[in-house]
Image (spheres, rainbow, N blue to C red):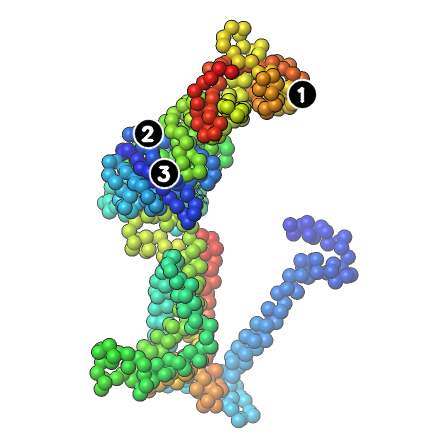
Amino acid sequence: MTTLERGAAPQAPAKSLGGLLDRPEWLGPLMIGPAVLFIALVVGIPFLLALYYSVSDISMGDRTMRFVGLKNFIAVAGTSNFQTSIVNTFVFAIVSQILVIVLGTALALALLRDFRGKWFVRFLLLLPWVAPISLGTIGWLWIFDSTYSVLNWTLEALGLITPHGWYMWLGIPYLAMGSVIAVHVWRILPLATVILLAGLSSIPHDIHDAARVDGAGYWRHLFQITVPLVRPIMLVAGLFGLVFAFTDMIVIFVLTRGGPYDTTQVLSTLAFFTGIQGGDLAEGAAIALFLFPMLLAVAIGFLRVARRAEVV
Amino acid sequence: MAIVETRDVQKLFGDVRAVDGVNLATNEGEFLVLLGPSGCGKTTLLRMIAGLEQPSSGDIIIGGQVVTALPPRARKIAMVFQSYALYPHMTVGKNIAFPLKAQGTPREEQQKRVQRSASMLGIGHLLHRKPRELSGGERQRVALARALVREPAVFLLDEPLSNLDAKLRTSARDELQQFQRQVATTTIYVTHDQVEAMGLGHRIAVMDSGRVRQLGTPQEVYHDPADTFVATFLGSPPMNLIEKPEYSLGFRPENFLPREVYAKDGHLFALPCRVTRLEYLGSDRLVYGVTEGKLEGHRVISKLPSNISVFMQPGERHEFALPEKELKFFDPRTGLRAAPRAL
Ligand SMILES: Nc1ncnc2c1ncn2[C@@H]1O[C@H](COP(=O)(O)OP(=O)(O)OP(=O)(O)O)[C@@H](O)[C@H]1O
Ligand SMILES: [Mg+2]
């Protein structure tokens, strides 16, 4: 095909715009150009800027900026709230992703079947995804509120706790982390479910029938046929969610602001509080850049999975 | 080995009667073919026998036991799908071993049986490949080996040859038949290809719009069709049918030959024709014509073996005839076979 087009090129003189657009060596760059430009402006420049800030002594309200080498990184790494944040980041990202994958698979399997009112369940499921995230999270703030918590009220009405035993969902270290993870899972679940649903419905029906005829019970069928066949898509969804959990801060910012006592502080919120609210741009950039190697590892995993999935 | 029986089996999909009251019973170790045009309900019937589809009414009986309510795995059946449905993430060996694993067969026993069924189908050297690294013919054998390995009481096959090219299909048909005679397991085989059906089946069930029109040996369904549907569905070209208000008359193109081919004596039914078109098919010649005389104005086809060299030309009138015993009569209203009558 390429040779054909090359062969035709000399006949269509490149003078007119139409002629130019017919030539793959022009058309290709032209089509991909805007995307490259967009990435360079929106991702590339801020990233380079952050790299530069992290090795300088820039701060807000200060016009001078000097190169200080790795001083910021060393200073940041020594602080205890940074070390807690790293641990929290991993706990938050990994636990929420495991929950998302497990719950998403279960939901997708349920939605694959036909039942009455399926459209309504789908609609409910997608709701968290279409609602603005900050609004949704503020709703959760009320659900977890220490005096008006509907969650506590419900638990009390069910007789599971006494009026004096109300939980401070966002005020007690482990409960706060649990709450934050729950809201994050609530938020990511719709997307993960839809992706997994697409993966599950792409498995040919005959394969499931063959497994049933071959005598596989429910669990064997699930773990030896269904899950291995959606594994590439599951991994893509998982890695995508992992990147999201590493970098997103809205849920934590609205619910706990990293508290109580930094027990829900993650790298992204710490970078924000240090760099933007604390005014120390250089240290904020350094904290944010600690995320970079992790994200890079995840991205490489991503690409490898995507390539393997193509072959199968 | 087992006898499979269906009793008044019906399947409705909404308003569609996919299977409409089928009564069938196989013999022990028989090769039964379900033959019919596309959409007549063959696959649906087979899936109900397998337990993949629940009948709307009626019962499935395998080996004397009513299995209608049982799941597929409790029915001692194995099925080969049109797409083969091999597990793409498992090697050939794992694919074949899967039914054994599901059964809880001990590991050494699994290995032995996988080896045995793989070598029976000549795929012993492919056990470490993934399905996507196989040709169509090899995949079909893997699917058969996977069905065979459990030593089921019944094989169910849904158009297992339709994904193969014409040449491979002929040799695969041959192997399939040998294989079935060797294991002597009751087999139900779905196809819409009449050549396959005639060549493979001990008996053929000819289906149309959810019903079995006739169940019989290949000879019976071909030479003694039960109705006009069976008569015109089988044969290439199909049976000539002359429809009159009082009766319908059918005869096979290969029996309908120029008068001079037949000996002078014998009970012949003569039917003059005006030749409209000739077609050369290598081994045969097809003569298209319009009848004249008492049964005037019907289109008929004659199939002449090419070793009969009668000269004919379009536009010309020619005397044709056929043995009287080859005339089949049908009731014009019901389409059912009727007693012969004098013409
Ligand atoms: N799941 C289904 N839902 C609705 N209608 C169906 C379903 N499965 C089959 N049918 C209908 O039932 C009829 C019989 O289908 P079936 O697949 O049994 O035909 P078939 O004889 O196997 O045809 P083919 O030779 O094309 O495979 C068809 O009219 C089909 O449209
Ligand atoms: Mg079919």
Disc 1 target residue: B314
- Going by the numbered disc 1, the residue's amino acid type is Pro
Q: Chain of mark 1?
A: B
Image coordinates of residue A70 in percent, x first then y, are 46, 82
Image coordinates of residue A191 in percent, x first then y, are 44, 67
User: In the rendered structure, are the residues bearing label 3 and label 1 in contact, judged by CB atoms less than 8 Å apart?
Assistant: no
Disc 3 target residue: B21
Viewer-side residue, A160 vs B255: B255
Helix, strand or loop at mark 3 = strand
Q: At 49% across and 18% down in the image, what residue appears?
A: B327
Viewer-side residue, A38 vs B51: B51
Instruction: Give the image quarter of residue A187.
Output: bottom left
Image coordinates of residue A23 in percent, x first then y, are 70, 58
Instruction: Give the image quarter of residue A77.
Output: bottom left
Viewer-side residue, A109 vs A9: A109
Disc 2 target residue: B30
Of the two numbered discs 3 and 2 in the rendering, the one whose residue sits closer to the viewer: 3
Q: At 78% across and 61% down in the image, what residue appears?
A: A15
Instruction: Tell me if residue A249 comes above or below residue B337 in the rendering.
Output: below
- Going by the numbered disc 3, the residue's amino acid type is Gly
Marks 2 and 1 share the same chain: yes
Q: CA distance from mark 2 to mark 1?
A: 48 Å
Of the two numbered discs 3 and 1 in the rendering, the one whose residue sits closer to the viewer: 3
- Going by the numbered disc 2, the residue's amino acid type is Glu
Q: Chain of mark 2?
A: B
Q: Earlier in the sequence, mark 2 or mark 1?
A: 2
Q: How many marks?
A: 3
Helix, strand or loop at mark 2 = loop
